[in-house]
Image (cartoon, rainbow, N blue to C red):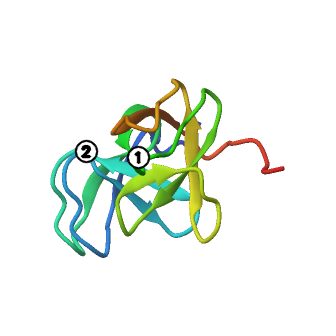
């Protein structure tokens, strides 16, 4: 096959701001990745675009398995607010309102919002 390029689970991408290792970044409206190491602003770096990650979440938000999670780029956390935010995955574990993190399965192939 002559048109295959790569598996795509790790992509070299260029964020417009510095991104610390283990922190997420939303490229455009639909491509989300977790930095595999510290990436300076406007510099190509490696971003993991699939898998399950423990990500920070908005304080007080209760999350159930299967909840769609949205990226708050300002605070660099996930929450359940769809207004002005992009869905970056689904919860694979529940998290109490007091929890700091939630397990998130990243993915672009998410069910349509209802």
State the residue in front, 88 or 56. 56
The mark found on residue 22 in the picture is 2
Question: Is 87 on the left or on the right of 59, as rendered?
Answer: right
x and y percentages locating residue 83 in the rendered image: 64, 67
x and y percentages locating residue 50 in the rendered image: 47, 37
- Badge 1 crowding class, 10 Å Cα cut-off, few under 14, some 14 to 19, many 20 or more, is many
- In the image, what residue occupies the spot 60% across and 58% down? 81
Quarter placement of the N terminus: top right
Q: Are marks 1 and 2 in contact (CB under 8 Å)?
A: no
x and y percentages locating residue 36 in the rendered image: 24, 44
Is residue 3 something that shows in the picture? no
State the residue in front, 14 or 2. 14
- In the image, what residue occupies the spot 46% across and 42% down? 8
x and y percentages locating residue 46 in the rendered image: 28, 50
Marks 1/2: CA distance?
A: 14 Å
- In the image, what residue occupies the spot 25% across and 64% down? 44
| Res. 49 image quadrant | top left
- In the image, what residue occupies the spot 52% across and 70% down? 28
- Badge 2 crowding class, 10 Å Cα cut-off, few under 14, some 14 to 19, many 20 or more, is some
State the residue in front, 101 or 13. 101
Residue indicated by mark 1: 57
Question: Is 9 on the left or on the right of 76, as rendered?
Answer: right
Q: How many marks?
A: 2
Question: Is 93 on the left or on the right of 56, as rendered?
Answer: right
In the image, residue 15 above or below residue 76: below
Is residue 98 something that shows in the picture? yes
Mark toward the viewer: 1 or 2:
1
């Amino acid at each position: 096959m002559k048109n295959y390029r790569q598996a795509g689970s790790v992509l070299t991408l260029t964020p417009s701001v510095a991104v610390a290792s283990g922190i997420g970044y939303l490229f455009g409206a639909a491509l989300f990745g977790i930095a595999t190491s510290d990436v300076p602003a406007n510099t190509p770096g490696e971003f993991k675009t699939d898998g399950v990650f423990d990500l920070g979440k908005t304080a007080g938000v209760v999350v159930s398995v299967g909840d769609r999670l949205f990226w708050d780029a300002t605070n660099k956390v996930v929450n359940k607010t769809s207004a002005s935010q992009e869905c970056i995955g689904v919860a694979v574990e529940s998290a109490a309102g007091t929890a700091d993190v939630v397990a998130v399965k990243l993915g672009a192939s998410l069910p349509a919002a209802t």
